Image (cartoon, rainbow, N blue to C red):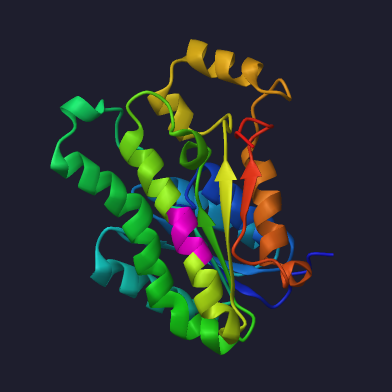
């Protein structure tokens, strides 16, 4: 099951964390992968080396996903290197910073929206011609538990952007279904061992968050990656417009 042999994938934000785990998991199941990074060239090179060790083709491409010209260049480079594109994982995103709404500037709100929601839109738009040519394209977007529960302190802009990604995903699923393209979102909750939580949460807060989850622990990047492999596979051909929560039972239902 989940055989991705002969499939070509681009994963944004794949230099580390969840993105790196997704890139590696896709390669483990037979896909060739372009590893996008913004500011983590050394770690992206390490991911490429690990993919090569699995016997799959890979290369790293740097681009700023908030710049349309750079996103277009990224997708063109990926398509040229791979010879096509079947799987697009829009993982790149950022909290940017925790800012209460009363102190939030227009610039901060716009920056958070741009790097999360608008960057996802830009990347999908650029990749559409290649995904249509594929005939069985897969788009996987990255939402968040924050889209369901509003996020942690000072994360209103991030929660709004991630909720927007869910709406974008549902709308595109309808629009692109006639092209044989499925569009689904992943919504991770507390995933331990990532730069995100190490940067924006204290060790005590991380420990308390994990302990409070119904399953009693945080998730792992590999567990998010396993869901991405499923959504990228032939087995998920009838799944589109959905958001798969990977949160240990944290999301309100």
Say if residue 83 shows up in the picture.
no
In depth, the one of 14 and 144 nearer the eye is: 144
Q: Quadrant of the C terminus?
A: top right
Residue 86, position in %: x, y?
59, 76
Residue 54 or residue 131, whichever sits in front: 131
**Residue drawn at (64%, 27%) of the image:** 218
Give the quarter of the image for residue 180.
bottom right
Q: Is residue 59 magenta?
A: no
Is 64 situated above or below 69?
A: above
| Vertical side of 144 occupied by 139: above or below | below
Percent across and percent down for residue 112 are: 29, 45
Residue 139 horizontal/vertical position (percent): 55, 67
Magenta span covers which residues? 165-170
Residue drawn at point x = 47 percent, y = 49 percent: 15
Residue 191 sits in quarter: top right
Q: Extreme bottom residue here?
A: 133
């Amino acid at each position: 099951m989940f055989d991705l042999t002969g499939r070509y994938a681009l994963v944004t934000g794949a230099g580390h964390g969840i993105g790196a785990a997704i890139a590696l998991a896709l390669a483990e199941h037979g896909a060739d992968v372009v590893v996008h990074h913004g500011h983590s060239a050394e770690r992206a090179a390490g991911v490429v080396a690990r993919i090569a060790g699995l016997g799959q083709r890979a290369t790293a491409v740097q681009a700023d996903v908030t710049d349309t010209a750079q996103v277009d260049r990224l997708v063109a480079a990926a398509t040229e290197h791979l010879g096509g594109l079947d799987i697009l994982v829009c993982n790149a995103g950022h909290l940017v910073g925790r800012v209460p709404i009363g102190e939030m500037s227009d610039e901060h709100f716009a920056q958070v929206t741009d790097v999360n929601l608008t960057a996802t839109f830009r990347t999908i738009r650029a990749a559409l011609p290649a995904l249509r040519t594929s005939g069985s394209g897969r788009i996987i977007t990255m939402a968040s538990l924050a889209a369901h529960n509003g996020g942690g302190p000072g994360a209103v802009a991030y929660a709004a952007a991630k909720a927007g990604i869910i709406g974008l995903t549902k709308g595109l699923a309808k629009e692109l279904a006639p092209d044989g393209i499925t569009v689904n979102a992943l919504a991770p909750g507390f995933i331990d061992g990532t730069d995100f939580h190490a940067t924006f949460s204290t060790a005590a807060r991380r420990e308390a968050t994990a302990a409070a989850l119904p399953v009693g622990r945080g998730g792992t990047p590999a567990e998010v990656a396993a869901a991405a492999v499923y959504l990228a596979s032939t087995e998920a051909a009838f799944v589109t417009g959905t958001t798969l929560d990977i949160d240990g039972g944290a999301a309100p239902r």
